[in-house]
């Protein structure tokens, strides 16, 4: 099963860049399963919509403006995408991921599994680093995801 | 009856844009364009090493990554008078041209097609007739009745299952939709297919750039791409051959699918060649440098004033004094404090938010002016200017389209004119990408192996500007370097020119002016406003993009 981990965010606006920092962190791992692709999607514009069709299982990692404590990670699954429970405004890119996925559905190329790992940011001020809180949360969330990838791999293999 | 329409945000664009329009007697009488996001970009670059600026600049936006990288690196090269070897110019030219191919494809099919194509009407089409029609306008092998039938079946299951919400931002069934069902079906089939070809163009850029989005191969003074035609460990002939195949496939799709589709749509909506002119001052900068000093270019630049193509003011180099000396940005009506109109090297970015005030400040967008006047930028500017300058290829494309559609040059000052010019530009970029590749291989074959002039930043004060004719038009990055650090940085982006608010004299920008006189049949469904705004290909995504999980409606359309 091919897995794509797609980090989205604007690196210039502190915690907004969480998804990109997340990918950079995972690139330092030596234990990822071989069929996992890491992809820095930047601000996830239309120009990368086609990536979502390139795997059986997709994890999108992004900052979300949800109510809740900064640093919390909210997980959305395929049904949320299909039933449009993911907020339509996934980005200022108004043809958001959700709409791109629906086009993929119409093309018959929808990924088998898709998740959004949404982290609630602390700061969106101009700046190229994460806030201390998210800096601390990043390796924890990454470790959880890596352990999930390994577990699933063992079960299916 | 006077009514006001507020579209907030405008859908199917990159970024957050709000449009307010006053409508009287079925026509827009006044309009305001308001960028709803603040870019903190300039602030972030201050104090950094000029050599690294491009890696930050390409994070401004998710679409325009490559273009900001190019402009930024050119700004340093201009400041320090660094020459760029021909091989490096060609590598950059291929990436620039191929990036445009992807960008224009995405715009046409995924951002604007649904303004003109009624997706539900496609269900009524006869797939065989649609295939016959498609085959009569194009040699593209993918236009079979079987393929169109399969698309129609899938679409029907979506509609029957009540899942048309995916195109929630499309106005199907709107009285302004005019295409016959067969054309709608053909366009929907190509809309779905276009995904595959934008991917090919993106892959081609990644082969040279190392990564896409966010190319990795630029250095001040050239490129870091290691090309050795015979060496397996570097970019060799085999990789370049693969890249060529990708670019040829993308070219065939652009020239045999996108462009014929566009001509069909233009023929059916000829009335839109008389709507949406707006500001008819045009600015384009020369692009595709052919020498090491940015003085000879594949396509020229220039200025057209008041739509008068007979009196083109040519801009032949990136060091043109008129161009360098006459750009200013006004903040009289934008949410910034400070003096009114400043040259970008003296530019200040200090936010001062007041809320939307139509008679005072109402946008995060500054108002760029060329010699005190607003200017429209983008493919239309580039095509009109190169036509006026006598470029043979541009002349052929324009003359052929004019003969086919019964147009004159005057008709290009319009909403449909902008779409047509973008299609022509895509057509041209698809060819140019391959020509630059041929030139690169020929130059390598002649034994020229220079890729970069390694450059150190000296002490002292320098200022430079990097011009780039990007997919959305004239882009410029203005940089002041003091003692090896960035002292000031201002990006004057194409959408700033076009989405510009009024200036200190109250003169509207191109979006605002283009909406005046625009028809609006149903104020609750202002499809016509979207057509004109989308024709500019707005991209103002240079800021926050966190998800809003409240699931607010896509667009608030308020009719007052």
Image (spheres, coloured by chain):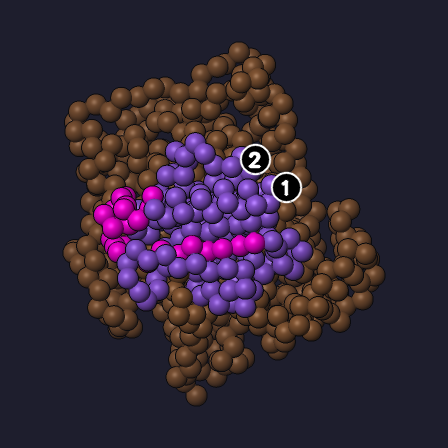
Chain colours: A purple, B brown
Q: Are marks 1 and 2 in contact (CB under 8 Å)?
A: yes
Q: Is residue B160 above or below residue B316?
A: below
Point out which mark residue B204 bears: 2
Which chain does tag 1 point to? B
User: A3 or B345, which is in the foreground?
Assistant: A3
The tag on residue B250 is 1
* Residue ranking furthest to the front: A155
- Mark 1 or mark 2: which comes first in sequence? 2
Mark 1 vs mark 2, foreground winner is 2
Residue located 69% across and 52% down the image? B260
Task: Name the foreground residue: B552 vs B351.
Answer: B552
* Neighbours of disc 1 within 10 Å: few (<14), some (14-19), many (20+): many
Residue A124 sits inside the magenta stretch: yes
Q: Name the subunit of mark 2.
A: B
Left or right of B122 in this view: B411: left
Location of residue B384 in the rendering, given as x and y in whole percent from the top left corner:
51, 49
Span of residues in magenta:
A113-139
The reply to whether the magenta stretch includes residue B467 is no
């Amino acid at each position: 099963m091919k897995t794509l981990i797609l980090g989205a965010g604007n690196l210039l606006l502190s915690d907004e860049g969480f998804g990109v920092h997340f990918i950079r962190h995972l690139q330092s791992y030596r234990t990822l399963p071989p069929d996992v692709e890491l992809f820095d999607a930047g601000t996830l514009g239309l120009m990368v919509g086609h990536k979502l069709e390139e795997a059986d299982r997709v994890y999108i990692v992004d900052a979300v403006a949800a109510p809740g404590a900064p640093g919390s990670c909210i997980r959305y699954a395929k049904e949320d995408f299909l039933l449009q429970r993911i907020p339509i405004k996934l980005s200022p890119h108004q043809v958001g991921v959700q709409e791109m996925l629906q086009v993929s559905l119409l093309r018959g190329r929808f990924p088998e599994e898709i998740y959004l790992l949404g982290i609630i940011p602390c700061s969106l001020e101009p700046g190229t680093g994460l806030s201390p809180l998210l800096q601390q949360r990043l390796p924890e969330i990454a470790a959880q995801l890596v352990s999930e990838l390994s577990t699933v791999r063992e079960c299916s293999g | 009856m006077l009514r006001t329409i507020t579209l907030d945000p405008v859908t199917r664009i990159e970024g957050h844009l709000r449009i307010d329009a006053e409508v009287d007697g079925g026509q827009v009488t006044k309009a305001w364009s308001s960028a709803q996001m603040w870019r903190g970009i300039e602030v972030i670059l201050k104090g950094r090493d000029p050599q690294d600026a491009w890696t930050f600049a390409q994070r401004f936006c998710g679409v325009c990554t490559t273009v900001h990288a190019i402009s930024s690196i050119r700004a340093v090269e201009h400041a320090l008078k660094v020459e760029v070897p021909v091989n490096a110019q060609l590598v950059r030219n291929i990436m620039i041209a191929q990036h445009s191919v992807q960008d224009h494809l995405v715009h046409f099919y995924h951002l604007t097609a649904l303004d003109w194509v009624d997706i539900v009407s496609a269900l009524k089409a006869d797939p065989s007739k649609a295939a016959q029609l498609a085959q009569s306008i194009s040699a593209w092998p993918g236009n079979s009745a079987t393929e169109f039938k399969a698309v129609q079946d899938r679409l029907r299951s979506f509609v029957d299952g009540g899942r048309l919400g995916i195109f929630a931002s499309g106005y199907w069934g709107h009285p302004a939709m005019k295409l016959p069902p067969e054309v709608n079906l053909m366009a929907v089939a190509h809309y779905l297919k276009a995904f595959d070809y934008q991917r090919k163009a993106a892959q081609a850029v990644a082969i040279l750039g190392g990564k896409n989005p966010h190319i990795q191969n630029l250095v001040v003074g050239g490129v870091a791409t290691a090309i050795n035609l015979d060496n397996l460990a570097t970019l060799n002939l085999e990789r370049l051959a693969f890249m060529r195949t990708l670019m040829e496939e993308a070219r065939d799709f652009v020239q045999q699918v996108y462009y014929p589709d566009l001509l069909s749509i233009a023929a059916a909506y000829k009335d839109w060649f008389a709507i949406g002119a707006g500001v008819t001052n045009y600015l384009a900068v020369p692009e595709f440098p052919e020498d090491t000093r940015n003085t000879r270019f594949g396509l020229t630049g220039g200025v057209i004033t008041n739509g008068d193509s007979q009196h083109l003011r040519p801009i032949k180099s990136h060091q043109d004094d008129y161009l360098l000396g006459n750009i200013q940005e006004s903040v009289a009506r934008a949410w910034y404090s400070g003096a009114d109109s400043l040259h970008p090297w003296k530019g200040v970015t200090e936010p001062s938010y007041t809320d939307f005030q139509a008679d005072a400040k109402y946008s995060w967008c500054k108002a760029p002016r060329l010699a005190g006047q607003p200017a429209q930028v983008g493919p239309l500017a580039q095509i009109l200017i190169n036509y006026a300058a006598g470029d043979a290829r541009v002349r052929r494309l324009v003359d052929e389209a004019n003969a086919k559609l019964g147009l004159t040059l005057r008709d290009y000052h319009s909403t449909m004119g902008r779409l047509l010019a973008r299609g022509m530009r895509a057509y041209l970029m698809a060819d140019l990408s391959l020509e630059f590749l041929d030139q690169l291989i020929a130059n390598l074959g002649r034994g020229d192996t220079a890729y970069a002039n390694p450059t150190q930043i000296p002490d002292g004060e320098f200022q430079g500007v990097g011009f780039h004719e990007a997919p959305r038009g004239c882009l410029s990055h203005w940089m002041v370097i003091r003692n090896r650090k960035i002292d000031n940085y201002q990006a004057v982006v194409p959408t700033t020119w076009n989405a510009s608010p009024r200036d200190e004299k109250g003169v509207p920008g191109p979006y605002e002016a283009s909406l005046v006189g625009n028809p609006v049949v149903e104020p609750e469904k202002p499809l016509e406003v979207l057509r004109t705004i989308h024709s500019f290909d707005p991209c103002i995504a240079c800021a926050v993009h966190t998800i809003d999980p409240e699931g607010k409606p896509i667009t608030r359309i308020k009719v007052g």
